[in-house]
Image: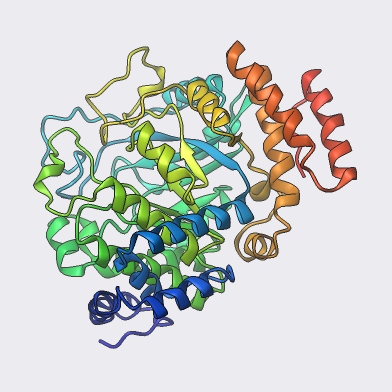
Amino acid sequence: MKYDVKSMKAEEFINDGEILDTIAYAKAHKDDMALIDEIIEKAKLRKGLTHREASVLLACDDEDKVNEIYDLAEQIKKDFYGNRIVLFAPLYLSNYCVNGCLYCPYHAKNKTIPRKKLTQEEVKKEVIALQDMGHKRLAIEAGEDPVNNPIEYILDCIKTIYSIKHKNGAIRRVNVNIAATTIENYKKLKDAGIGTYILFQETYNKKNYEYLHPTGPKHNYDYHTEAMDRAMEGGIDDVGIGVLFGLDNYEYEFAGLLMHAEHLEAVHGVGPHTISVPRVKHADDIDPDEFDNSLSDEMFCKIAAIIRIAVPYTGMIISTRENQEVREKIIRLGVSQISGGSRTSVGGYTEKERPHDTEQFDVSDNRTLDEVVNWLMRNDYIPSFCTACYREGRTGDRFMALCKSGQIQNCCHPNALMTLKEFLMDYASEDTRKIGEEMIQKEIGTIPKEKVREIVKERLVKIENGDRDFRF
């Protein structure tokens, strides 16, 4: 198999030989300061890097160069995403699954985990609980089971979620993280009004992939890896990719992840809307120490920083798998979306105490959404609940065009302030509200266009008087 970024065959656009050659090249040139300086200068143009260039930076362990990469990643993140952090929550619909994934407690042979599937009435209760926290954006999750979790069930859940209006609450964007499926089913998801379709590759190493997925439809590496092409063919504009770091050698996964992004850009004219960087964590029946590819916090942050400069326009997601300390380090290096107040169990949001019996993985950041919002603002980040781009049709290549030109800031910054104001009025604690009001007043002054600034001021007053859902 030859490497071909435009091929529609998984083993050609994620080519094992190319990845191994890239890793070897990176190791051979990790001390070539002239080359590294050249790559960093290219990264400063904000047009991205190839997987091979990025891999050289990953291999470089010169402290001064690494710090230069970190500073550049932080600046690029500010250039495209400002100081905003978008908040979301996962919603687990069902843990029934027919696959045999060795790293996931939902695997079919696990007899200790209680199996549960939400009814539509239970979905409604979960959504109301999430709305009462202040969430506007969800990522729905379900195991792969054609009997218990068919596409019709997922579509019914999406319809239910969008239909619920509770007090001032509403879920305005539903992202979907379900197993690889057909073009026809992706069309159905598109018609249902989803935001981003998310599917983690888990590992790009085919041999290891097949070992880690011994049974079930997920065993088919090619079908899984080619899913994003089918999703885009089915009309879904925004797709999110990611690997589960710790399953294989991080250099291999890093190169494969960027090759996947390059492939989507080359074939469809737009790369991934988001890239996620989860790590293997403890869960029922799963011990992360069984995987010998664990990733240090330091390398984890370095990977995030280089992803940011390699694909500067793509959103980056970090979940509550990571603790507060790690999240604090990695956010400044390029992350633009985080989860808050998350529960990874089926039906977990309606339980007073956090249930652990149906969790997909242990949550390391157990703070409430209000506490996360408060923490972000104390670190000078604007917590954003904005969903405007999706609802205004600024998706796919349209979103990327605005992002690349910097014009997206004219929408996202004001929208972040208005959605934060909603949160402060409806859900925030007294301390969070005080900090938030001070932040909004400070940030209004940074809006460059006077007309936009005046509109935002008017709308903030209307929000205070009870109106909701303004957007640019």
Q: Position of residue 85 (x, y in %)?
A: 56, 40
Q: Residue furthest front?
A: 64
| Position of residue 395 measured from the top left corner of the image (x, y, whole percent) | 63, 57
Residue 272 in the image, given as x and y percentages of width and height: 49, 62
| Number of marks present in the image shown | 0
Reply above or below: 464 against 319: above
Q: Is residue 374 above or below residue 13?
A: above
- Residue drawn at x 33%, y 29% is 346
Question: Quick check: 246 above or below 270?
Answer: above
Using the image, determine if residue 62 lies above or below residue 12: above
- Can residue 243 be seen? yes
Looking at this view, name the residue that lies furthest to the bottom: 2
> In the image, what residue occupies the spot 60% across and 42% down?
84
Nearest the eye: 353 or 180: 353
> To which quarter of the image does residue 57 belong?
bottom left
Judge whether residue 167 can be spotted in this image: no
Quadrant of the drawing holding the C terminus: top right
Q: Is residue 215 left or right of residue 162?
A: left
Left or right: 287 in relation to 85:
left
When asked about the image quadrant of residue 406, the answer is bottom right
Tell which of 277 and 100 is nearer to you: 277
Residue 470 location, x and y as percent?
76, 35
Q: Please name the residue shown 23% across and 65% down the image.
A: 220
Residue 21 versus residue 133: which sits nearer the camera?
A: 21
Q: Is residue 163 left or right of residue 187?
A: right
